[in-house]
Image (cartoon, helix red, strand yellow):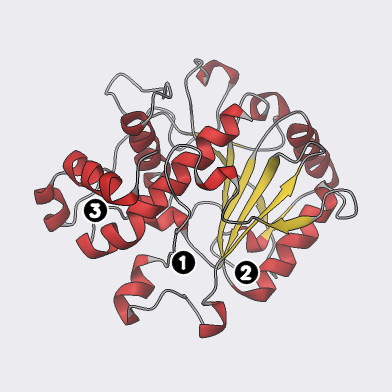
């Protein structure tokens, strides 16, 4: 298991010290970015699938496109560099992340891993709730990240309740000794991660209020105790990937542990 100090050194070497100082990250370009995936886009390698959802006007947050596409590009690159996972690449050797929606359940079923960002305004139609439920109960994995405050939590919790009954599938806190924190890399001390703009402004780790100063990493498990829905609330893993090279201090403090956790999550989703 690689510790965070060694991981940080490896990532700095990968990005390059000059790139860090210039504040430049991998932006990347991919033939699959900006359109919905089709079955022909899947080639057997890992592809980061971002779930595009409907958004309610009375919800909270900026929606599904936050951090897109740089977060998935960068996380996929680090996954390919730090593990043996076969990451799907295009002709330019860039990752091939995908956009998917629940109206195409056959396409979604090909994704071992789904990501949602700022889900505090997401809502599912009854048909979409059924499609997501079937995906999860057949072995799929959903990670919802970057929503802050009680209102956003409550709003999305109601939507999840339409997908999975809270009586049968309760939301639980993940203890730091859960395997997901040590699947490949040691992420047991992962901190609260703020968006870089909030951190630059005040150097705090919450985005709105000190009441949000404690991050929550929670899950919904299947009948065998395996995580099928991961909820990272009052924290922003996506920014730690998207903005990896914009500030060297932010990188070492947040991107390094953020990558450790994110890589663990992906490997866990593909092996459980």
**Secondary structure of the residue carrying numbered label 1:** loop
Residue farthest to the right, as pictured: 167
Q: Which residue is mark 1?
A: 192
Nearest to N terminus: mark 3 or mark 1: 1
Residue 99 is at least partly visible in this image: no
The Cα atoms of the two marked residues, 3 and 1, are separated by: 19 Å
Q: Which residue is mark 2?
A: 60
Looking at the image, do the residues carrying marks 3 and 2 touch, with CB atoms under 8 Å apart?
no
Q: Is residue 185 above or below residue 105?
A: below
Side (left or right) of 82 relative to 215? left
Pick the front one: 12 or 44: 12
Which callout, 3 or 1, points to the residue nearer the camera?
Answer: 1
Percent x, y of residue 125 = 80, 48
The Cα atoms of the two marked residues, 3 and 2, are separated by: 28 Å
Percent x, y of residue 89 = 36, 23
Q: Which residue is mark 3?
A: 245
**Secondary structure of the residue carrying numbered label 2:** loop
Point 67% across, 75% down: residue:
150
Pick the front one: 45 or 79: 79
Point 80% across, 44% down: residue:
129
User: Which quadrant is the C terminus positioned in?
Assistant: top right
Residue farthest to the left, as pictured: 18
Q: Is residue 265 above or below residue 253?
A: above
Q: Which mark is residue 68?
A: none
Point 12% across, 56% down: residue:
22
Side (left or right) of 257 relative to 157? left
Side (left or right) of 248 relative to 166? left
Which callout, 3 or 2, points to the residue nearer the camera?
Answer: 3
**Secondary structure of the residue carrying numbered label 3:** loop
């Amino acid at each position: 298991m690689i510790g965070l100090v060694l991981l940080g050194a490896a990532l700095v070497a990968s990005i390059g010290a000059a790139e860090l100082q210039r504040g430049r990250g991998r932006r990347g370009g991919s033939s699959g970015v900006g359109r919905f995936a089709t079955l022909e886009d899947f080639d057997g390698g890992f592809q980061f699938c971002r779930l595009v959802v409907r958004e309610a006007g009375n919800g909270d947050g900026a929606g599904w496109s936050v951090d897109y596409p740089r977060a998935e590009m960068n996380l996929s690159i680090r996954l390919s560099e730090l593990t043996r996972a076969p990451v799907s690449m295009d002709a330019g050797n860039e990752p091939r992340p995908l956009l998917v929606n629940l109206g195409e359940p056959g396409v979604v079923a090909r994704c071992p891993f789904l990501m949602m960002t700022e889900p505090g305004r997401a809502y599912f139609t009854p048909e979409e709730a059924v499609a997501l439920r079937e995906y999860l109960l057949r072995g799929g994995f959903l990670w919802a990240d970057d929503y802050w405050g009680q209102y956003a939590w409550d709003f999305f919790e109601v939507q999840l309740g339409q997908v999975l009954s809270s009586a049968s599938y309760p939301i639980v806190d993940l203890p730091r000794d859960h395997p997901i924190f040590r699947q490949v890399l040691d992420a047991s001390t992962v901190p609260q991660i703020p968006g870089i703009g909030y951190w630059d402004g005040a150097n705090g780790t919450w985005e709105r209020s000190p009441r949000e100063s404690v991050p929550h990493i929670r899950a919904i498990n299947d009948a065998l105790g395996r995580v099928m829905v991961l909820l990272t609330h009052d924290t922003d893993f996506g920014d730690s990937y998207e903005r990896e090279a914009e500030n060297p201090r932010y990188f070492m403090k947040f991107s390094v542990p953020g990558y450790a956790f994110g890589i663990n999550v992906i490997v866990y989703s593909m092996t459980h």
